[in-house]
Image: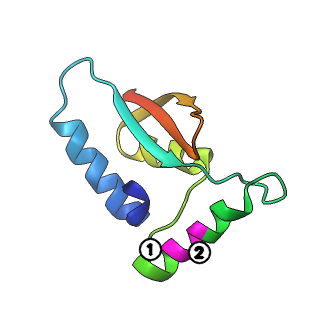
Amino acid sequence: MLHDWSDEDWVRILKNCRDVMSMDPRLLIAEQMLEPDPKRGRPTTYLIDVQMMAMFGNARGRTPEEFDKLLHASGFNALRLIPTSSVVSIIEAAPA
């Protein structure tokens, strides 16, 4: 549920995870991805994003590029983005 948190909290949470991980771990993050171009994205994805911002303040959906930036700031490298049959995708990451 990382989408419930601000960027700063997101980085703090993942840095804590990184600090306790073993030498060759993989981090899997299941989140809904925002399409950077709203013309190509699902309208419901943006509605959920607005609802999260209204309910949690700093919470919001993120684009794959934003996830990548936050992962790097947390000491991880994104390895791949795995689409699923649902609205949720899986990001596989490893320590940088």
Say what secondary structure mark 1 lies in: loop
Horizontal arrangement in the rendering, residue 44 relative to residue 13 (left or right):
right
Give the residue furthest to the top. Answer: 24
Give the residue furthest to the left. Answer: 20
Residue 50 is marked as: 2
Horizontal arrangement in the rendering, residue 88 relative to residue 77 (left or right):
right
Residue 2 is marked as: none
Q: Quadrant of the N terminus?
A: bottom left
Residue under the image location 73 percent in, 63 percent down: 43
**Is residue 8 in view?**
yes
Residue type at numbered disc 1 = Asn
Q: Position of residue 86 (x, y in %)?
A: 57, 42
Say what secondary structure mark 2 lies in: helix
Q: Main secondary structure of the magenta part?
A: helix
Q: Position of residue 10 (x, y in %)?
A: 36, 56
Label 1: which residue? 58
Give the residue furthest to the right. Answer: 39
Residue type at numbered disc 2 = Val
Q: Quadrant of residue 71?
A: top left
**Magenta residue span:** 48-52
Q: Position of residue 47 (x, y in %)?
A: 64, 70
Out of 70 and 1, give the one closest to the viewer.
Answer: 1
Ranked by sequence position, the earlier of labels 2 and 1 is 2
Above or below, 10 relative to 51: above
Horizontal arrangement in the rendering, residue 25 relative to residue 29 (left or right):
left
